[in-house]
Image (cartoon, rainbow, N blue to C red):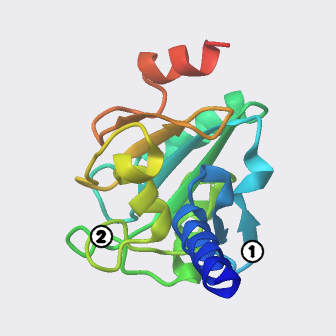
Amino acid sequence: MITKKLFSLLSFLMISAVIYSQSSFYDFKVKTLEGKDFDFASLKGKKVMIVNTASKCGYTPQYEDLQVLHEQFGGKLAIIGFPANNFMNQEPGTAEEIRQFCTEKYEVTFQLMEKISVKGDDMHPLYQWLTSKDKNGVMDSAVKWNFQKYLIDENGKLVDVLYSKEKPGSDKVIAWLSAK
């Protein structure tokens, strides 16, 4: 009897641990474009903008706007770019090619991560969290195109999603960054 109850309790705890293992933005660990580990827990206390990027897109010049934002607000904002090849093969490059393009063309110094998938069956777990209210607790969304932006507050809570047309330095973004 005790053994059965103990087994049931342990099973419940193990299932709960799996279900809640990625319940927070700060639980995610990813790889940088250079293949190094990056722990989102290091972003606690900062606002974060997550952006899916591509080098051959009409919105690619937003790299410049993202870099300006990074330079202006880098002390309180972390911009994290995730190259993704989900839309019309607009990010076909290797990590080295992406780094070279971003550095030479846009002088990017904000953090770029490894190339991932932001939609479909192979969607990265971070983007599953960003797009699912069941996981992020705030809203459902779909990644519609390159340079979609997700805003995360200083406590790791999803605040908003901005679609590609909204520039990184829009009035809405500046107001969010200026708010306490």
Q: Is residue 162 left or right of residue 40?
A: left
Q: Is residue 5 left or right of residue 133?
A: right
The one of 94 and 7 positioned closer to us in this rendering: 7
Image location (x, y in percent) of residue 100 = 59, 72
Give SS at disc 2: loop
Which of the two labelled residues, at mark 1 and mark 2, occupies the earlier sequence position? 1
Q: Which residue is mark 1?
A: 37
Density class for disc 1 (Cα within 10 Å; few <14, some 14-19, many ≥20) is few
Q: Is residue 41 above or below residue 19?
A: above
Type of amino acid at the residue the image marks with label 2: Gln
Which residue is rendered at x = 49% and y = 62% of the image? 126
Residue 90 tag number: 2
* Residue 113 to residue 78: above or below: below
Q: Position of residue 52 (x, y in %)?
A: 42, 57
Asked if the residue under mark 2 is in contact with the one under mark 1, i.e. CB atoms within 8 Å, the reply is no
Say which quarter of the image contains residue 129.
bottom left
Horizontally, is 138 left or right of 25 in the view? left
Which of the image's four quarters has the N terminus? bottom right
Q: Quadrant of residue 28?
A: bottom right
Residue 170: tell me if it is visible.
yes
Query: In the displayed structure, does residue 91 sit left or right of residue 74?
Result: left
**Image x and y of residue 93, in percent:** 44, 81
Residue 48: x percent and y percent?
Answer: 61, 40
Tell me the kind of residue under disc 1.
Answer: Asp
How far, Cα to Cα, is label 1 from label 2? 25 Å
Which of the image's four quarters has the C terminus? top right
